[in-house]
Each structure stands twice: as C-alpha cells, then as structure tokens.
C-alpha cells in the first residue's frame, strides 16, 4: 500500500517545525536568555524518538556488515546534524535572527542535491528542476529586494563595546556559522539516505543520531566554555521558549527522517527551503517578533510554495 505524496508531506511538516523552531530561538534571545537550548533539543529528540521507536519501530535487523555500515551512517548523520548542523544553527539564529539566517540556510539543498547526485546517483527530474527554479527565484527576490541585516546604532552593550561594533561582529560570525551549518545538514541528508537504504527505520535512525549528538556534546563540554553554557538546560529548569524550540526541532528531525524514507534527498532538501518563508511569516504575523514582510517577500513566498507544490505533484512515492 502507498500513500500519495507521503514523503513530500513529511518534508513540508519538517520545514514547518524547523521554521517555528527558528522563531522560538529568536524569541528566547529577545527575552534575555543567552542559552539557546541546542543540547536540550538533542536530548528531547532522543527521548521522543526512543519512546516512539519502542512502540512503533521495526524489529532490529540481524547484525551483519551491511547493517553495521548503515548504523555507522546514522552515527555520521548524528554528528553532522546534531553537532555541526544544529548547534551552529541555533547560535547563528541567536546572532542574526530568524529571517536573515534563513537566507543562508538555503544553501542546504544545494549541498544536499549535489552530494545526492554524486553519491546516490539521483536524477534531477523536470518537476524537481521547475520546483527548484521557483523556490530559488523566491529566495533571490528576497535577497535582491534588500532585506539587509539591521544593526543597532549608538550606545554600548553590556560588555562596554559600542553596539554597532558588537552587532556587526555578531552578524559576521552568525553568517559563517550558518554556512557551516548548511553544509553539515546537506551532508546529513545524504548520510541518512545511505543508512535508510540498509536499515529502513526512521525512528531508530533519529534515536541513534540524537544519542550520537549527546555523546559528542559531552566530549566537547570540558573543552569549550560555550558548550558548558549550552548544557545548562539539561540540569536546570529551561525557559519556555527553549522548550518550544527544542520540541520543534525534534519533531522537524523525526519528520525529515520519514520524508527521506519515502522520497529523494533532492526533493526533501528543496521542500525544506520553504522553512525560510514559514519562519518569516510566523515571526512577523503570529508572534510579532520581527517586522512584517513586505510585498516582495509575499510574492517570493508564493513562488516558493508553488515550487514546493510542483515538486510534490511530480514526485513518486515509495511503499509504506
């Protein structure tokens, strides 16, 4: 039995969750909480995926070389997504904002599609090409339309440095972290697809990835002051928006695993690009934490969603 567009539906649900998480991270920073809850989100992902796997997951396959290879790719995806991808993304959004960093995250499908073509022998179909063009026309419209990063002028920050200098440094650092995060996420898409080809259990894959993230994070803690700070919510009561952000990212990752199990890496990555527009509209309209997007952004949003629809209608779906 197959459900039409199942992979694409999961991909869109994942994009919505990731978009909402970006808004929640931004709200958390606006409320004066310096800890962005990145490691809290990894812990919550492990708990949620583990509980779901116990009730709904598939039986463990017989251990052989292929299965161990698949599990190894789950571990690699965990490092790429939960450490270099997720932690850097949380920090980048905190430094730059949900809307601005969303533009840099549009590099994810570029990395993912390129790697999928090289390593997975995926083919770019007509529907994917048209959808890709529409989505990136929307992104280009936003960039060319002049949505420049705003910095605060005058005065000094809590460190005593001029706020313009501090804000500019934060923006530059946030952009670098956002680019590294995008490359890591692109690699994680492909690693997960490799793993699911051998061990087709999205919940197990999510669980292994999250546990990998927690283990790697624990190794980093003694070496990094920032990492020690980010671990604090694991041992104290977190702020409400930290919990919201963590839960949103957790659901986003779980849905993304299911999407990859039912459609191509390229389709999942491109559909995930609409996260940028989801985050912007949620941030501006629902939570009113950023300026409401103008006409250019509205048109760009329509182009992106149209591209998503084209990809969805043109993709085949695997069995469930």
Image (cartoon, helix red, strand yellow):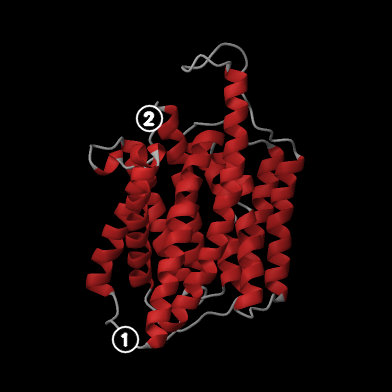
* Nearer-the-camera pick, 203 or 12: 203
In this rendering, the label closer to the viewer, 1 or 2:
1
Whether residue 163 sits left or right of residue 262 in the image: it is: right
* Nearer-the-camera pick, 20 or 69: 69
Whether residue 59 sits left or right of residue 84 in the image: it is: left
Looking at the rendered structure, the secondary structure element under dot 1 is: loop
Looking at the rendered structure, the secondary structure element under dot 2 is: loop
Residue appearing at x 30%, y 53% in the figure: 44
Quadrant assignment for the C terminus: bottom left
Residue 199: image x %, image y %?
39, 80
Residue appearing at x 36%, y 40% in the figure: 230
Image vertical order of residue 146 relative to residue 115, above or below: above
Label number found at residue 63: 1
Residue 220: image x %, image y %?
38, 49
The residue that label 2 is drawn on is 33
Residue 173 visible? The answer is: yes
Quadrant assignment for the N terminus: bottom left
Q: Residues within 10 Å of mark 1 (few under 14, many from 20)?
A: few
Image vertical order of residue 212 relative to residue 115, above or below: above
């Amino acid at each position: 039995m197959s459900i039409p567009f199942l992979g694409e539906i999961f991909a869109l649900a994942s994009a919505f969750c990731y978009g909402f998480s970006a808004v929640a991270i931004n709200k958390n920073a606006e409320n004066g909480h310096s800890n962005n809850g990145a490691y809290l989100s990894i812990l919550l992902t492990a708990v949620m995926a583990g509980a779901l796997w116990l009730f709904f997951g598939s039986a463990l396959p017989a251990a052989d070389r292929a299965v161990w290879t698949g599990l190894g790719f789950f571990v690699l995806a965990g490092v790429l997504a939960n450490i270099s991808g997720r932690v850097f993304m949380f920090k980048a959004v905190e430094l730059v904002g949900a809307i601005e960093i969303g533009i840099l995250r549009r590099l994810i499908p570029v990395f993912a599609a390129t790697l999928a073509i090289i390593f997975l022998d995926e083919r770019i179909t007509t529907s994917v090409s048209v959808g890709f063009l529409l989505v990136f026309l929307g992104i280009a419209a936003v960039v060319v339309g002049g949505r420049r990063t705003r910095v605060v002028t005058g005065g000094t920050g809590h460190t005593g440095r001029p706020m313009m200098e501090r804000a500019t440094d934060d923006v530059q650092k946030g952009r670098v972290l956002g680019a590294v995060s995008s490359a890591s996420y692109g690699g994680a898409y492909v690693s997960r697809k490799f793993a699911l080809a051998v061990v087709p259990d999205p919940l197990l894959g999510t669980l292994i990835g999250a546990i990998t993230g927690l283990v790697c994070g624990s190794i980093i803690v003694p070496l990094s002051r920032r990492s020690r700070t980010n671990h604090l919510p694991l041992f104290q009561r977190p702020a409400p928006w930290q919990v919201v952000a963590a839960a949103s990212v957790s659901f986003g990752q779980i849905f993304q695993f299911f999407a990859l199990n039912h459609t191509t890496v390229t389709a999942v990555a491109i559909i995930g690009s609409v996260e940028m527009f989801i985050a912007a509209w949620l941030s501006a309209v629902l939570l009113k934490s950023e300026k409401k997007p103008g006409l250019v952004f509205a048109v760009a949003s329509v182009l992106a969603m149209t591209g998503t629809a084209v990809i969805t209608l043109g993709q085949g779906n695997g069995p469930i």
